[in-house]
Image (cartoon, rainbow, N blue to C red):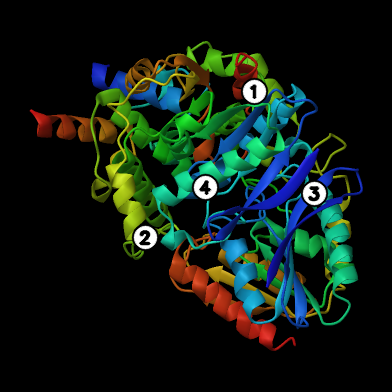
Amino acid sequence: MLEPLFFPSGELQLFGIWRAANNAKHVWVICPPFAEEEKSAHRTLTEIALALQARGESSLFFSYRGTGDSEGDFADATLTDWRADIAAAVAVVGARVPDAEIGLLGVRLGASLAYLERERASRLLLIEPILAGRAMLSQLNMRQKMRVSMAGGGAALPAGDLDGWPLGENLRDELNALDLRDTVKYEGEAQVWNVGPRDAVAPPLQNFADQIGAKTRAIVMPAFWNLLDYTPPVPLLEALTSVS
Amino acid sequence: MSEIPLIFPNARGETLVGILHNTAKTPRGALLFLHGWSGYRTGPHQMLTRAARHFGASGWSSLRFDFAGRGDSEGDTELATLATMRDDTNIASRLLREKFTDGPIIAVGLCSGCEIAVAAAGRNWDGIALWSAPIFAALPEQSGQEKKRAANLGKYARKLLDPRTYLKIARGQVDTAAVGKAMKGGGGAANKNVESREPGQLPPGFRAQSLSDWKKYNGPILQIYGDADPIAPDARAWYAQHSARPPVVETVAGANHSFYGLDWERQVFEITQKWLDARN
Amino acid sequence: MNLLNSRIKNMIVERLFLPVDPNAIADDASLMETYDIDSVALFELVVGLEAEFDISMEDMEFSPANFETVNAMAALVESKQGEGS
């Protein structure tokens, strides 16, 4: 079953897609990546939700405030708000399937936020979590510069305009401060996945996984959150079968 | 204004997901947003959500939805074509017409969504706004196709379905048989707009039939391009040549193909708003 | 072939999932033209260079000319590594 819905987070309504499985013992909140990465990753996350549903696990794939179809203005959003949005999504799935174990599944920034909200879940699946928000912002700024250069130059966008996303000062400051490179053990069951060209987990991600006590896995496929065109996420879905 | 989640079936029985934007008062008309090939109903950069809210504030209701195989809708991504998207659009357009019986129905396409607007124009709309419209149903890399194929193996490799192939490529064990298989046919961006009887490709005759229908469409057309969009010159010439009624063409200075900048996006909304105001 | 260029070629093939022999990439061939590099692929190369050579590029330093050929990328890596020594 597929049910699009709005649910409250504070004063705002957030949009999500609820995919229910019959008698689900596990339910997941799917935490998307940041800004334009979400667009590239969206279909892959839908396919992950479908794969979970096919094996009897429910999920809520939602949009943070100021993104997707959710209410709110991106310019006003903060990481603190988005963590509250994850909490609101957890409350929704907890109410819908009271006896199920709750897991958080996130990609990139979504994985980082899922880790920060780990106490709300008994399982984490973190796909390429952002360990240093400053580095992510720097790369996104560089990517924006590439777009300008490859379109034949022209004026750079003003500060605060991240490829059409209005980056507020508070969000920028919180991203710059985001650092998961020295963190603590997670008591639940966790996996950290590396997605890229190598059949090996990158050392920084391995260190993070070791600190939180997570298993790791390398998924050999392109970084789907950066692509313009859809790539069938077969290696990712295959790996999903290993998550018990 | 209210925003209501909507699901509805397409002709193939797949469930499509959309958001209906209802204005508080009697709407001046309704907009049907058609997203691009690699986007979904919200954007890129949330542009379509923001557009629906922007035009909603001035009295235009709207529907944004995901084509089958895109966004949250059901369907196989690799089997979606302009033809399946056109069929989905016909149903969405009918739905919109049932909900909003008064006032004009206007299609707003972005990038490849403009191609869908062209393919479905004959029967559906009182006006069409085309943001960054490419030449209709052009083949990828029409010129120098074979040369490009040899050079672009990487792009074809990305659509290989077998995870073992990724592994082999990653390990330097090139699987030429699998690569060749991927290049032969099938759907996806690499084969966009190829006509054949293969699943995931356009049915033979689609381009000619759609073009014939388009030439009969005599409603108003607005086109907006960024002047840093490399497709704009050829595409503008194509529409000038093939449209029954000359489009109104506006340019956003400095903007790229997907209007990846807040000021460019604002200008697109303002130009479109002015054009819509003249419709009703 | 020098080691640096060889590592860069391997990185290009790896990052872009190119089913070609890295040695087949010429040092001075235009990568943009030969492999039709778009902004997505270019971004992958930047990320790949940073990871492979443990260098960090500030966004203000980006120029497509630094990624035009293997030789240009090698010069960039040498200059970045020189900054740290």
Q: Nearer the viewer, residue B147 or A59?
A: A59
Mark 1–mark 4 Cα distance, whole angstroms, equals 26 Å
Q: Nearer the viewer, residue A25 or A242?
A: A25
Which structural element holds mark 4? helix
In which quadrant is the C terminus of chain B drawn?
bottom right
Q: Are discs 1 and 4 located on one and the same chain?
A: yes
Q: Is residue B225 above or below residue C31?
A: below
Q: Position of residue C73 (x, y in %)?
A: 28, 33
> What is the chain letter for disc 3?
B
Q: Is residue B82 left or right of residue C78?
A: right
Q: Neighbour class for label 4 at 10 Å: few (<14), some, many (≥20)?
A: many
Of circles 2 and 1, the one toward us is 2
Mark 3–mark 2 Cα distance, whole angstroms, equals 33 Å
Q: Is residue B133 above or below residue A126?
A: below
Q: Position of residue A64 (x, y in %)?
A: 53, 50
Residue B16 got which mark? 3
Mark 3–mark 4 Cα distance, whole angstroms, equals 25 Å
Q: Position of residue B226 (x, y in %)?
A: 51, 68
- Whether the residues at callouts 3 and 2 have beta carbons within 8 Å, the answer is no
Residue visible at 81% across and 60% down in the picture: B119
Most extreme residue toward the left is C85
Residue A237 got which mark? 1
Where does label 2 land, which residue?
A: A168
Q: Position of residue B74 (x, y in %)?
A: 78, 41
> What is the chain letter for disc 2?
A
Tell me the kind of residue under disc 3.
Leu
Q: Neighbour class for label 1 at 10 Å: few (<14), some, many (≥20)?
A: some
> What is the chain letter for disc 4?
A
Where does label 4 land, which residue?
A: A85
Q: Neighbour class for label 2 at 10 Å: few (<14), some, many (≥20)?
A: some
Tell me the kind of residue under disc 4.
Asp
